[in-house]
């Protein structure tokens, strides 16, 4: 596994590099198929962020991408927190894959079972684009991420109130329910939005108690039918 150690607004000492390489050996043991790991050590120059002035971001590239980050007033502390988080994600991924091969019914066959009474899927498998509003103006103080599509991050103020709705648009390829659950576990979230490759529907998987999961799909229906059923 190739390891890239990058310092932003700072230099990474040899002691820190040695510590990073030792920890990455543990990462490689849990993710033997990983091809590259990037460790970004970032020093924040903003004095208002003194308590979180040292930030460490760890990204592991393999069959999928696993990422974790942490911040503290000391970069060694930040690195320990970030490495603990990414190791935990990799351990959970390893445990889930081990459990899946114990002769039990595959998870995707359970959660992807047809729902009684559900309407037929649109043969075209297309989703109606979200309606745009005149308030969808880009705000200058919202920072986009590297490689983000144009207009992917917007803030829409609600007239007459202090409420602001922040919206992000991500690009994604269709995937199965099992793949979506794997991605959710890798990023450490409680839910994951995706396009179901089997139905072409906008869907979301979410974590329930223990090692159980749920899936929600959104299917477009004519406005008249929606009003009648509501």
Image (cartoon, helix red, strand yellow):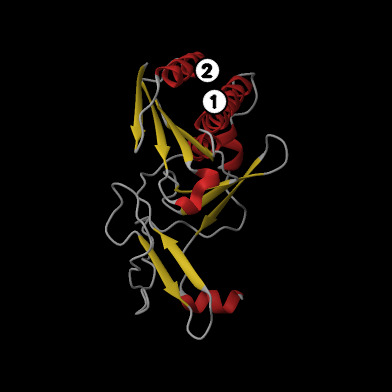
Give the residue pinned by disc 1: 90
Quadrant of the rendered image containing residue 139? bottom left
Left or right, 193 with respect to 150, comes to: right
Q: Residues within 10 Å of mark 2 (few under 14, many from 20)?
A: some
- Looking at the rendered image, the quarter that the C terminus falls into is bottom right
Give x and y (percent) for residue 219.
Answer: 49, 60
Q: Mark on residue 195? A: none
Q: Mark on residue 30? A: 2
Give x and y (percent) for residue 6.
Answer: 34, 29
Give x and y (percent) for residue 59.
Answer: 42, 31
Q: Quick one: which residue is furthest to the bottom in this view?
A: 160
Nearer to the camera, 109 or 37 = 37
Name the residue located 57 percent from the left edge and 58 percent from the top edge: 118
Give x and y (percent) for residue 147.
Answer: 28, 47
Left or right, 121 with respect to 116, comes to: left
Q: Please tell me how many numbered marks the rendered image carries.
A: 2
Name the residue located 58 percent from the left edge and 27 percent from the top edge: 84
């Amino acid at each position: 596994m190739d390891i890239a150690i990058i310092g932003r607004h700072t230099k990474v000492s040899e002691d820190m590099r040695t510590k990073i390489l030792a920890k990455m050996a543990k990462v490689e043991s849990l993710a033997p198929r990983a091809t590259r790991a990037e460790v970004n050590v970032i020093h924040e120059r903003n004095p208002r962020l003194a308590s979180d002035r040292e930030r460490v971001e760890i990204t592991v590239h393999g069959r999928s991408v696993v990422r974790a980050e942490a911040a503290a007033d000391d970069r060694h502390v930040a690195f320990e927190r970030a490495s603990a988080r990414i190791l935990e994600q990799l351990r959970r991924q390893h445990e889930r894959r081990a459990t899946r091969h114990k002769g039990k019914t595959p998870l995707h066959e359970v959660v992807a079972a047809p729902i009684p009474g559900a309407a037929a899927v649109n043969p075209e498998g297309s989703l109606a684009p979200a309606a745009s509003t005149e308030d969808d103006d880009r705000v200058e103080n919202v920072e986009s991420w590297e490689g983000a599509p144009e207009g992917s991050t917007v803030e829409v103020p609600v007239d007459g109130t202090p409420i602001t709705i922040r919206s992000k648009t991500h690009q994604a390829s269709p995937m199965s329910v099992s793949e979506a659950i794997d991605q959710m576990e890798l990023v450490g979230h409680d839910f994951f939005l995706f396009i179901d490759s089997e139905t072409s529907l906008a869907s979301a998987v979410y974590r329930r108690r223990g090692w159980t999961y749920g899936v929600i799909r959104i299917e477009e229906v004519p406005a008249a039918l929606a009003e009648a059923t509501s």
